Image: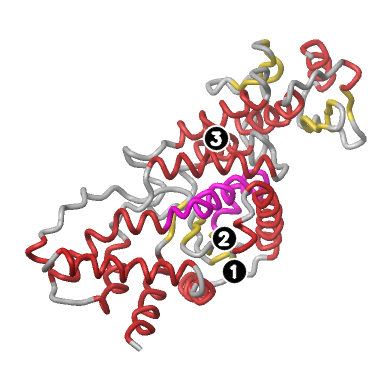
Amino acid sequence: MFIHRTKRTLLAAAAVLSLSFCTMAETSPVQAIDIGTIGTIAQAGAYYAQLNQQLNYLDNEGRDDYMKQIKAKYGVNTDYQANAMTERVMTRLSNAIAKTDPSILKKPYNYFVNNDMSFNAFCTIGHNMSVNIGLFEPLNYNENEVAFVLAHEMGHGQKNHAISGVKKRMPLDLLAAIYGSGGGAAQLGAAILDQIGSAKLVTKPMEKEADALGFQYAVAAGYNVGGGAALWQRFLDKEKDVQTSGIMELFNDHPTTVSRRDTYSADITKWSNNVVAVNKDTGMITIRKKDFYQPQDIPNMSGKERAYLIAGNLSAVYHNNGKPSVSDVHVDGNNILCVGQQQIMDLSPVKNPEEVTSTLKKLL
């Protein structure tokens, strides 16, 4: 009965135990524990064991119950477009991950769209994921960019960052709070709830690892190689207008928005075997360091954001030592400039489409 009651408490508390796609506010350094306050080292060890037991429960047989608690806390949003896109993206990403990491088949992701209007998504213990409805409109429901957000979160999930963060960051504060107040293990869940808002669970290495895995997962699932760079460029363009509830304030030990965009931009170039690049200051797309095209702003998308998506498509052409020829360049029936079967860009908003097509042929 005691364990069951503790599990229920932890289930309710851990509903907020998430790893944000963005980041949390900066906190004060964690202080060392005064063993004299806690009791004996053996007692401390017993409570660490209890913590591990409860986390293991949430991560496995209790994960579906945990998901119910998360839904109850955040609310389930029924927006058709957001839910349909989440379903498509999660299915594609899960299938792609399974090819190299079959562990996902044993513990497939639970996921839903919640009612929070801020720009965020999170993956917490037990492969439980939730996407804020507030994520979709700022991204203009761009599936390539949404895919990179969810792929990043699945990177956290596949590496068990939620549990690692709790074990590495939370126990010190938890034990100090529990023993300092004369409490016991029954207060473990309440202590997590009290501490979660100030605990720094997401570290810079975790974020970088999730970003790198997110790129691998999204690209393996067939999404645009430039989606990650475009996502962060969009946030740079729109951050003053995006509701973030403070969570987007990036602090010193986390990657900045600019550095994340630039890392993903470098990934575009690497993917193209160092053929394609984007000038971060001007948005000029280059092929073998020669100017190809500098996109202009269009409604709902800046020229720089467009540049990363176009460059991502071009990168796919040159991946694996691709050697396109002039004869591969054509415009399809939907006014899309293509190289072979690879779509490159929509020519509809381009003022001089013939010149762009001609330039691409020259640079191939």
Residue 276 figure quarter: top right
Q: Is residue 43 left or right of residue 120?
A: left
Image quarter in which the N terminus is found: bottom left
Q: Which residues are magenta?
A: 134-162
Q: CA distance from mark 3 to mark 1?
A: 27 Å
The amino acid type, in three-letter code, at marker 3 is Gln
The crowd level at tag 2 (other Cα within 10 Å; few <14, some 14-19, many 20+) is: many
Across and down, in percent, residue 113 comes to 58, 64
Amino acid type, mark 1: Asn
Residue, x 63% and y 19% (percent of image)?
284
Callout 3 secondary element: helix
Name the secondary structure under disc 2.
helix
- The verdict on residue 144 being magenta is yes
User: Position of 175 compared to 273: left or right?
Assistant: left
The C terminus appears in which quarter of the rendering? Answer: top right
Percent from the top left, x then y, of residue 261?
Answer: 52, 33
Residue position for label 3: 233
Check whether the beta carbons of the residues at disc 1 and disc 2 lie within 8 A of each other: yes
Viewer-side residue, 164 vs 276: 164
Q: Is 55 part of what is drawn in magenta?
A: no
Q: Which residue is mark 2?
A: 133
Question: Looking at the picture, how far across and down is residue 168, in whole percent?
Answer: 31, 54
Q: Could you tell me which residue is drawn at 11 percent across and 68 percent down?
A: 39
Residue displayed at 27% across by 68% down: 194
Task: In this rendered view, identify the residue nearer to me: 238 or 205.
Answer: 205
Look at the picture and state if 249 lies above or below 237.
Answer: below
First in sequence: mark 2 vs mark 3: 2
Residue occupied by mark 1: 77
Observer-nearest of 238 and 90: 90
- 325 sits to left or right of 206: right
Q: Which mark is residue 21?
A: none
- Of callouts 1 and 2, which one flags the residue occurring earlier in the amino acid sequence? 1
